[in-house]
Amino acid sequence: NAGVTQTPKFRVLKTGQSMTLLCAQDMNHEYMYWYRQDPGMGLRLIHYSVGEGTTAKGEVPDGYNVSRLKKQNFLLGLESAAPSQTSVYFCASSYGERTSYEQYFGPGTRLTVT
Amino acid sequence: KNQVEQSPQSLIILEGKNCTLQCNYTVSPFSNLRWYKQDTGRGPVSLTIMTFSENTKSNGRYTATLDADTKQSSLHITASQLSDSASYICVVSDDYKLSFGAGTTVTVRA
């Protein structure tokens, strides 16, 4: 039982390049989330999904796209990377939508855009 | 706008000593408050969760308190160990949205 896994762990991009971050969970959770964590700030929600085939915008969605083609996977895409997207990205999943359900986080992906 | 403020930003303590971290929030309506531990290079892991009616919750050497009237919470670490070196994040929620604090970085020195 691996929980939530993320690939890759590290990535360096040049401005304008694109990439996809992969999140996978083996807990059969319906809800999945993508956050970014920047120094001196709390985690901010980028996009989330309430089930296979669904996606929704979070607090800071601009410049990102997501897809949830399979229940266990949630992909985060950057179509044209910008230095402002340098951050650590965390994926999380939960059994239910209400915040009483715990969110389980992956180990993170450190992205640097030069 | 819902806000979660944590203090101090960082602290250094000697192994075996105690410390207390603070969290003030303006989240409304309030559903629950969690403390997470985030080791360097890892994702956050939940330590405790408290609802409105709970004013204290323990998890081993970690004890969280909640004063819902003053909208304050604290996390007390007893007899610190080197493995307690981490960032501790306060997360306050309404029914559907989490609001994250920026965290307090704790460094435990031998």
Image (cartoon, coloured by chain):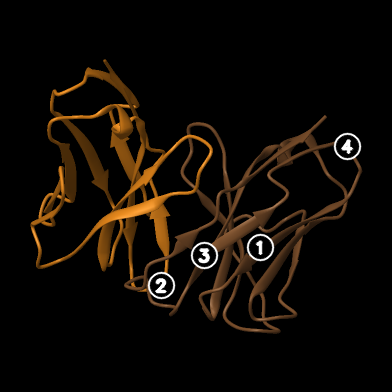
Chain colours: A brown, B orange
Task: Calculate the distance from the C-alpha at mark 3 to the C-alpha at mark 2.
Answer: 22 Å
Distance from the alpha carbon under mark 3 to that under mark 1: 10 Å
CA distance separating discs 3 and 4: 32 Å
Crowding around mark 1 (Cα neighbors within 10 Å: few <14, some 14 to 19, many 20+) is many
User: On what subunit does the disc labeled 4 rest?
Assistant: A
- The answer to the question of whether label 4 and label 1 lie on touching residues, with beta carbons closer than 8 A, is no
Circles 3, 1 touching at the beta carbon (< 8 Å): no
Cβ–Cβ under 8 Å for marks 3 and 2 = no
Residue behind mark 1? A23
Give amino acid for label 4: Thr
Residue pointed to by mark 4: A15
Q: Amino acid at mark 2?
A: Tyr
Residue count near mark 4 (Cα–Cα under 10 Å), binned few <14, some 14–19, many ≥20: some
Location of mark 3 (residue)? A3
Q: Residue at x 88, y 50 (%)?
A: A18
Residue B56: percent from left, percent from top: 9, 55
Provide the residue designation for mark 2. B96
Q: Earlier in the sequence, mark 3 or mark 4?
A: 3
Q: Are marks 4 and 1 on the same chain?
A: yes
Q: Which mark is residue A56?
A: none
Whole-percent x, y for residue B99 in the image: 40, 55
